Amino acid sequence: MKQHVRAFGGGTAEGRAKDKALLGGKGANLAEMASLGLPVPPGFTITTEVCRYVMQHGAGSYPEGLTEEVGQALETVETLAKATFGDHTTPLLVSVRSGAPASMPGMMDTILNLGLNDHTVEALSALSGNPRFAWDCYRRFVAMYGEVVMGVVAASEHEEAPFDLILDEVKRKHRANRDQDLSEVALRDAVAQFKAKVLEVAGEPFPTDVRTQLWGAIGAVFKSWNNPRADYYRKLNGIPASMGTAVNVQAMVFGNLGDDCATGVAFTRNPATGTAEIYGEFLTNAQGEDVVAGIRNPEPIPELGNQLPEAYAELLRVAKLLEDHFRDMQDLEFTIQKGQLFMLQTRSGKRTGKAMVKIAVDLVAEGKLSPREAVMRIDPAKLDEVLHPTIDPKARPPAVAKGLPASPGAAIGRIVFTANAAEEWASRDERVILVRTDTSPEDIHGMKAAMGILTARGGMTSHAAVVARGMGKCCVTSCTSLRVDAARKTASIVASGEAKEIRLKEGDMLTLDGSTGEVFLGSAPLVPAQLGSELGTLMEWVDSFRTLRVRTNADTPTDARTARAFGAEGIGLCRTEHMFFAPERILAVREMILAADETGRRAALAKILPMQRGDFAELFRVMDGLPVTIRLLDPPLHEFLPHTAKDIEEVAAEMGKSPAVISAKVAELTESNPMLGHRGCRLGITFPEIYEIQTQAIAEAAALVAAEGIVVLPEIMIPLVMVPEELRRLRELVSTSFDKGLGTTKLAYTIGTMIELPRACVVADRIAEHADFFSFGTNDLTQTTFGLSRDDTGRFLPTYLDRGVLAVDPFIALDQDGVGALMVLGVRGGRTTRPSLKVGICGEHGGEPSSVEFCHRAGFDYVSCSPFRVPIARVAAARAALAAEAQK
């Protein structure tokens, strides 16, 4: 019979850190710590295989023999803990916690102090000599079990949790300001009221049998794998639902037994900045959820050295040992009971993009990692955070409040008070700041939608802080001058240094500085991020490992300069039509479209030529010595014309035409499906003068800057080719026009095509007869392969993703099985005809890490992406090269 339960603690460990797929991250690392001889309370892990069994067979269904395995493992824990589960003299209490193979902080359920009832609480009281402690544990247990297992929760996000309401009333009744001020009598009162609420809401009494409690908790934790917040988090982070979670049952140790007890969370390095310092928070006389949930404002971890110096010294020793062992920054959970340290968890800590870079570089400098290992530790997508703008120090407004700098960066947005409101406003393209008293795991979707998060409570390791850092969101916590009334959609701040109260309402604008913890009214001015030396060091390693080149999609000199500063090795896509929309240019473009014949079109194009020549010359100057791929006109002509009656009248007056003439032209150019209509190279075939003049402008610009000593490497790209004959004819036209534009200047150039249609992939061998390069336009290739319109997929694609019909949005991450297979076919066909064919990608996928890795495997020469994604693509390319090398 397969073993479904693995023990740890007491000198045994039936597993190691490598067993995360089976034991989950928490269980595997508990076993690893136990194997290292660290102080880990004994317990056992129910494997992820059981979760998958439950998902397949239904809640409450378990593999044969599991009950017996759990019973035997529990007996071992009893022996090691010298206590008995349910005993009326020396009762064993346990925690029941989730633990998936991938870290999902706060997304699933936990229950502490399990095993208490009206008899065992009295036994715990006598055993500890501290009745208040025993009843504090009992009220915590009834509340957690009642919420998680029995469903006693708030009816909506606007309402406070039922048990919180009861506890607030108990504190008022017994004149206690804080939870820790509640007396034994008050806690007994709270427990009685909690139980009454359970009976009222659940329709059944709170269970007193401890084994019933245990199996109820195990079932609830498995069930929480599919709760809405866990499901949302998995989709957000690409974690498969089939993975499942393990369940960890562990003997309780108590941080709420007195002032020589504590509980806390610590990181072996600062997770916001990467600085090599112990970082975290703790509370004395408390339990773990008090720290994470922000129920009390905790103290910084170094203060533990003043209050419990021996336990603090032991924590520092264990922290160093674990970081050295795992060779990565660790996120630790610990409890101190009567001065003795116990370790409850270690895992690789969530960190900001800035911290990720610094930690990787520092670990190499310390000899713990090689540069190759450091690069493989980098999440390319998180580099985006390093490029976040910051508040302009020269125009910094006065702060109205200050909290803890929980996650760096700057965020500007309109205030919303609920997660649902954040998501709703963001769907209307509003930038929002989520303002809460504190956040809970149920707020995950709103935190994702928001630009930043501001909370009145919570510390640097609270739920808001940890999740925000993982998402790369700006976050300020513990803003104690903030008062939030979510139900009324208002908040107030007592401004720093003033007695006057500032009132805020939904929709008001705020700016947050997550690096300093400051809050500003209105919209503060921002400046681009300052890139540190660590990023430069990392990118040197990255560039030494990668073989795939990285270019940028840029239409303006500003974009080109930005991209080059980020390491772009040329322009892979310059969209000439984007240059047409400036007010002084659109008129000439419209004249060209409205012209009755070729003579009229050429007259209008003659006005456009010097404008385009100037544009191209600037790009060539910025990209001195690097290739510049310029795509000739691609979109259908109707996009340049007005469509509403008001706009038509305004344009008609501006051009001296009658509105009827313009309306007639709009009607003439209207198509049922313009993205599959008269666009791309089809415009060049029907109106060759357009491509001719554009090419002439490119050539004249190249000649002009070449005379200045600039090294010019122009590449002319013809879009949307479907048959070889299109490219043959247009190559001839482009070549003739380019040579004419160069005049006496001698300059090499290349002509290629954008592969955007499935047919082009199939006949790529024949298209390559007329092409020096292929650039895959994966936006349109995805549309035409799937038969989807990007503009219309919002009506049904989210449903496909929610229901698992599609695993990922194919417009975000390249569909490697379908679109990717066509691309491989196209590359193979093109290089069969022309072995030296240069191949690249210039769709939005060019900056998406998994798509970049695919391009490396498929033998591409380069990817091209937006300027701010260039560093991301560089790292993804290096990781792909190292992964391929490791497989040889």
Image (cartoon, rainbow, N blue to C red):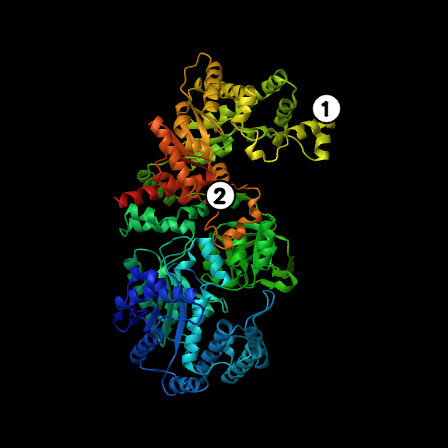
The residue positioned 49% from the left and 42% from the top of the image is: 786
Quick one: 586 or 54, which is closer to the camera?
A: 54
The residue positioned 27% from the left and 52% from the top of the image is: 368
Left or right of 71 in this view: 423? right
Question: Could you tell which of marks 2 and 1 lies nearer the N-terminus?
Answer: 1
* Residue 413 visible in the shown view: no
Callout 1: few (<14), some (14-19), or many (20+) C-alpha neighbours within 10 Å?
some
Q: Which of marks 2 and 1 is in front?
A: 2
Between marks 2 and 1, how big is the CA–CA gap?
Answer: 41 Å
* CB-based contact (under 8 Å), mark 2 and mark 1: no
Left or right of 327 in this view: 855? right
- Residue 657's mark? 1
Quick one: 487 or 101, which is closer to the camera?
A: 101
Q: Which amino acid does label 1 sit on?
A: Lys
Question: What is the x, y in percent for residue 575?
Answer: 51, 30
Q: What residue type is labelled 2?
A: Phe
